[in-house]
Image (cartoon, helix red, strand yellow):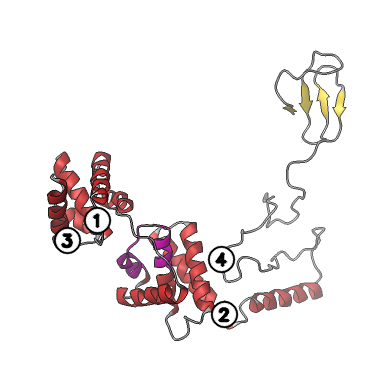
Amino acid sequence: MVKTGNQKSKCPRCAKGTLLTDANTGENFCDKCGFVITDKVEESGPEWRSFSKEEGDNRSRTGVPTSLAMHDMGLATIIGTADRDATGKPLSASMRSTIERLRTWDSRSQVHEPVDRNFRQAFSELDRLKDKLAVGDAVIEKAAYIYRKALEKGLVRGRSISALIASALYAACRDTETPRTLKDIGHASNIKRKDIARCYRLLLRELSLKMPVVDPIKCVARIASKAGLNEKTKREATKILQTAEEVKISAGKDPMGLAAAALYVACVTNGENKTQRDVAEAAGVTEVTIRNRYKGLKTALDL
């Protein structure tokens, strides 16, 4: 039993009782005199109930959401493994063998075309990279979209599927401003950085992709987290990078190297005990890069 509306709603007949709703029967009635206001309430829950043991308490109205990162976009049919009819009765032996044969051909027909096999291999690799690189669903959808466009234009023929899906993921990271470097993606996919860069340039040229310039401020949180720096240092580094952008000294510089140098400057300013090597290892750049960017920041910003 649940109360309807606010607690001030009273019975129109006795004006004393509170209106209640019975979720099972759908009746809306007074808890004092029993006067039934309405006997039919619109059902807001699922309009079906599960019969099979496999479904259990799953009462969702829909299945898996559609996604570009599935070879069939999540629109394929699935013949369930429960050998029971709509009323829950077991199927006969002849019908069970027929359903089993249909189930086999249904699974085979989903990857009948070479394009489907290509997508299945590419997107299984993409799913693996998603877990390794810890990127969001929006990045994965963008990467799948870029790869589908590449396959449409025939760019995959004669090239490695793994390298092309890795380059599509890097392009998606650049497009969504997710701080992942070529080195990160090469390490996760076990492919040479040079091969991914070549495929990435091919995608940019053939698909006419326009990539935004990487913002070094986006890299600060990631480097600081790896190096174990505190929040005060992160805020200080962000201010330094904002000032550097205003005076136009960040143009043409590697964003990871610039962010690492700003964090090192912030460490020196705040007295946090971190060496250039600690910050360099967290950022994936060399100590020489940090020294050069550190000198440039100190000179330009009078630190």
Q: Earlier in the sequence, mark 3 or mark 2?
A: 2
Place of residue 248 in the rendered image (x, y in percent of width and height, measured from the top left): 24, 53
Where's the C terminus, which quadrant?
A: top left
Classified by dominant secondary structure, the portion drawn in magenta counts as helix
Q: Quadrant of residue 93?
A: bottom right
Q: Which residues are drawn in magenta?
A: 169-188
Q: Earlier in the sequence, mark 3 or mark 4?
A: 4
Q: Quadrant of residue 91?
A: bottom right
Q: Are marks 3 and 2 in contact (CB under 8 Å)?
A: no
User: Residue visible at 35% across and 57% down?
Assistant: 179
Q: Which mark is residue 115?
A: 2
- Disc 2 residue type (three-letter): Val
287 or 97: which is nearer to us? 287
Place of residue 201 in the rendered image (x, y in percent of width and height, measured from the top left): 37, 75
221 or 121: which is nearer to us? 221
Residue at which label 3 appears: 289
Q: Secondary structure at mark 4?
A: loop
49 or 193: which is nearer to us? 193
Q: Are marks 1 and 4 in contact (CB under 8 Å)?
A: no
Q: Is residue 182 magenta?
A: yes
